[in-house]
Structures are given as C-alpha cells and as structure tokens.
Amino acid sequence: MSLLELKNIYKIYGDLHALDDVNLKVEKGEWLSIMGPSGSGKSTMMNIIGCMDKPSKGEVLLDGVDISKESSKNLTTIRRDKIGLIFQQFHLVGYLTAIENVMLAQYYHSVPDEKEALEALDRVGLADRAKHLPSQLSGGEQQRVCVARALINYPEIILADEPTGNLDDANEKIVVDLFHKLHNEGTTLIVVTHDPEVAEVAQRTVFLRNGKLHKETINENFTGEIKFDK
Amino acid sequence: MKKRQMYFRMITASLIRRRSRMLVALLSIAIGATILSGLVTIYYDVPRQMGAQFRNYGANMIFTPSDGSFTQADIEDGRSYIESADIVGVTPYRYESVRIHELPVMAAGTDLTQAKLTSPYWSVEGEYPSGTGSLLLGASLSEQFRLFVGDTVTVSYTPEFDGRSEDETILDNTIDLTVAGVLETGGPEEDYVYLQLSDLEQLTGKSGEIDLAELSISANSDKLRSYAEKISSSVQALDARLVKRVTESETTVLTKLQALVLLVTVVVLALTMICVATTMTAVVTERRREIGLRKAIGASNGGIIKEFMGEGMLLGGLGGIIGSVLGFIFAQQVSVHVFSSSITFMPLIVPVTILVSVAVTGVSCLLPIRSATQIDPALVLKGE
Ligand SMILES: Nc1ncnc2c1ncn2[C@@H]1O[C@H](COP(=O)(O)OP(=O)(O)OP(=O)(O)O)[C@@H](O)[C@H]1O
Ligand SMILES: [Mg+2]
C-alpha cells in the first residue's frame, strides 16, 4: 500500500479546474518533486495533501485513510500528527525565538521538549541561534528553522512548497542538503519547486499543467548521496 | 517542559515582545480600570466621608428664644428630650457689642469646647482657648487690629444705662484677655471675637442670658424633626428648628451623586469594552498569518481561543492591577479637590477591579477571537 494516493482528484473554483482529475501515488520514503508553471495547481495539490483543504471530488488516501471526507477538526489532528510543512515565506512566529518556534510544533503535537528542539536546531546547524528572534536571522536561517520545526515531530511526510524560492544559492544548497539527510533517514518528501536543479535531485519529478499531471520523470542517477552542487 | 509552561511562555512573549502593539490595548484597559476603581471608591467612600462631614457640618438644629432670650436651664431642659447618644455637641451663644481699641466689635460668649464640636470646620491658628482668660479672634479682626496669637487685648464694654444713677458717669467695664487662637472660616465668623461665656458675663455684669444654641445631633432627618417638634412644644422658652440646608442636602446630594457615579461607571465600562474589542479585532487582523500558521502546524480552534483568551485575560489582569493603583490615586485626587476629604483604602476594591477588568476584557475578546478561529490556514499561508 502506498503511503499517499490521490484518486481522480478535482479542485474546482467556479469554472476553473485548479486540479483536474489528478492521480498520484507516493511511496513511503520517496522523494518527489512537483514542477509546473505558475497557476498550474501545485499549491492547491499541496494544500489537499497537507490536510489544509479538501478536494471537490476524488479520494485522498493517507496511510490508507480517506482524508477527503474528514471534518476540519480531524484534518487538524491528522496534519499535526503526520505532516511537516515548509513554506516559501518561512512563516515563523515573529515574537518567538528560533527554539520557541520549533517548540511550538511540539506544543501542538504533544509536549514541548527544549532539549529535543535544540537538537533539531543543531541538525539544521542553528544551535547557536536558538535564542534569536526571526527578525535577527537571515532568510536562509529562518528557512532552516522552518525545516527544524517541520521535522521535530517525526512526520510521515514533509511537504515543502517552494522552500528555496526566497533563498540564495548558498542557502538553497544547505536546505537541499538537509532534504538529503531527511531522505536518508527515511522521511517521505514532497517538494514543489520552480527550480529544475532543486527538482532534479529528487527520485521522481511530476509536472503539472492546467491542473493536470502531464509528465513524470524518474531520476535514473539517484543514489541518495549528497551531490547537489552549484 | 510542561505544556502549561510553554503556554505561559508564549502568551507572555507575545505581550512582552510585541509590547508597542499591546500597549494600546493595555492602556485602554488600564484607563477603564482606573476610572472604574476610582469611581467605585468614590461611590462608596465619599458618601461615608461626606455623611460624617455633613453631620459635623456645624449644627443641624438650633434653639432660638421664643421670647427675648433663654437660659442654660432651658437648654438642659431641651437637651433632655434628645437621646444622649445622639448628641454630638450643644453650644450656647450670647452676643454682645464690645469694643477693642475703641472700635465696636461683635463678641460671642460661648462654650469654646462645645463650639469645636458643633463647628468642626473652624480652622484655628494657635489654640482653642481652654479656660477663661483667653479668647478666639476672628481672622479679619486679627488683621484689622494687628493682634496675633499670644498678644493681650483689652476688651471693654459699656454697661447699659439702668436708670438708677442718672448723674453718674458711666464707666466702661474692661477685661484683659490673651489671644489663644485666630479663627479662619472664610465666613462671617471671622468678624467676631469669641469669649468664654463666663468671661463675657463677667465683662457685662449680666449672666444667665443666652441668645442662641447650636446643636449637632447625629440622627436622620425624620428623627431630627420629631426631636425639634417635641422640644418646641414642651419647652416654653425654646424654639427648636432644624437647619434645613444641611440635613436635606445630606440625603439628596448623596443619592444624586451616587446615581451619577453609577451612570458614569456603566458608560465607562461600555466604552472600555468597545475599545478593547476594537483593539483585539485589530490584533487578530494583524495576526491573521500567525493564526493561519498556528493552525497549519496543528493548533485546534480551541487552542487558538485559549491562546488569545489567555493573552486578553493577562492584559486584563495587568490593566486591572495598574488600574486599581491609578484608580486609588484618581479617587484620592477627586476626593481631596472636590470633597476636601481623603479616601480610606478599601482592600476589596483591588481584587474586584482585577476580576472585572479580566471579565470585561474576556467578553470583549470573544467576538474578535471567534473570527480568529474562522481563519483558513491554506488561504493565509498562500502568499504575501
Ligand atoms: N481560493 C481560491 N479561489 C479561487 N481560485 C483559486 C483559489 N486558490 C487557487 N485558485 C486558483 O487555482 C489555480 C491554481 O493555484 P495554485 O496556487 O495551486 O497555483 P500554483 O501552481 O501554486 O502557482 P504558483 O507557482 O504561482 O504558486 C490558480 O489559477 C488560482 O488562481
Ligand atoms: Mg504555489
């Protein structure tokens, strides 16, 4: 059984088909890239997978459970337990320090654990920035805090919507390296990106156009080793 | 770390690190709480103070002679109709025209110990004369004659022609007295010289006559009225009258004042609620993204409500604490400047103010927080 399966998914706004009969399977531990032009429905799809939105039609099976018909309350629980989210615009709570932002995810998930949160920050190389507020961190550092926050609860899937969209090359590399590490630890990764170089390092890339999946490529050279280099 | 610890860390961080924003909300709550606790203090304390003041505000009953003058015995007679526990003071007055430095001056012979009780608003520089041989000089006379505390003054009196010795030159009676104190009241009393009754009797050579007695009685207006009626009908020589101005104003002014204070308190509470609700609405709007983010990483609606309520109530509590301190100062200022009496601190007002401002803040946060739970994480996180 696949970890995630989208079956004939539609998302319709008026007469706009943001998603138009999408079918997709993602296996446990897989690293998938999603590409496509602006407005092609990438974020719409991520929101549905991330339990933040429901499809107009179709089934979404996560761990064998159809989440497309769940109440928003249950979706919150599922999202909290199974999904780690990373956004293009970082989205940290401005008045909480780096470590408090990581602990926030623990707080909603189970119980905050400062030591564990510090370890997560250490993994993204920011242990020494733990007490900094987001405004005192660079964009790249903020995104790394987001990665730490996304991975803190050991989610089944990490969803990243344009995680490197606002980053320079050096920070982009750091974040992609982190994805490599997570992948090697067995985390399932779904990454939306405009950047072919970021997409290419994944095992598989699907292309969306006008809400339809129209192409899929497998990275034949994928070894799981860090070799992304710019 | 416990969940609760993280919760408090979060809401205090929100208040402390976003203080410039929160200050507006805090300010409105604190001002509301200040006015609230101030007015409630005034509501309870000033009437108490003023009641005491009104009761002591000079006499609330006077005895006048029904014919010419009366005697000390008549006063005692009248006095016997009043329950002794109700009597604050009874002061007899006899007025005579005397002369100081050859200028005519009105002298009042009285019992200065009793006068202190029936005219507590008298302000005396120096001391009240304690026995015979000294007098209390009205402030304007003191200025006119340049006589001050400690000076000796000769008071003279021309006895009335009694028809017995037609050819004799009538000699003035004189008495030397020490100025024990100078009397300031801002009223007509400043034009009088106050002597002990026995000194005046010695000076005039006539005793037993009294022109007026002032009584301060601690009783409500109904009881006062019945006292007055009984005395007037039972004691031949006396006419007992209530000093209306004081007794009536005591009740009506206070009722009106309290009604006004109550009204203002309600209005202030309503305004505070509107103000806090507006501020909280702004806070929620400003933090839409944060709320969306919190929901995206797993906050339930209940969690969001708990956090914002927590912030609101913490603000309410802080505002309440600030307000009860400032409110006391405010009430004190109002009391001192308007009612010339100082406030006694009521400890109960502090927890009440804090509770009320927490409750008011909580209620005013309800609507904005409800709208916070409606925020859809997907839409908020979509973009800038
Ligand atoms: N709430 C909505 N109401 C109406 N239309 C919407 C809504 N959300 C998305 N759309 C439309 O659905 C389409 C897909 O949007 P989506 O955000 O998924 O695009 P995207 O692939 O993520 O684009 P980008 O690369 O610019 O982020 C767009 O045409 C968008 O205008
Ligand atoms: Mg998008």
Image (cartoon, coloured by chain):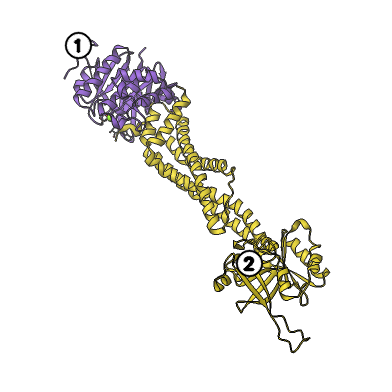
The front one of B75 and A105 is B75
What label sits on residue B233 in the rendered view?
Answer: none
Q: Residue at x 58, y 55 (%)?
A: B341
Task: Please identify the quarter of the rendering in which residue B68 is found.
Answer: bottom right
Judging by the rendered image, the residue that carries numbered circle 1 is A221
The front one of B58 and A1 is B58
* Residue type, label 1: Asn
When the figure is inspected, residue B134 is found, relative to residue B289, above or below; the finding is: below
Judging by the rendered image, the residue that carries numbered circle 2 is B178
Q: Is residue A140 left or right of residue A49?
A: left
- Colour of chain B in the rendered structure image: yellow
The front one of B52 and A74 is B52
- Colour of chain A in the rendered structure image: purple
Crowding at dot 2, Cα within 10 Å, few <14 / some 14-19 / many 20+, comes out as many
SS for callout 1: loop
When the figure is inspected, residue A62 is found, relative to residue B134, above or below; the finding is: above
Relative image position of residue A139 (x, y in whole percent):
26, 29
Q: Is residue B300 visible?
A: no
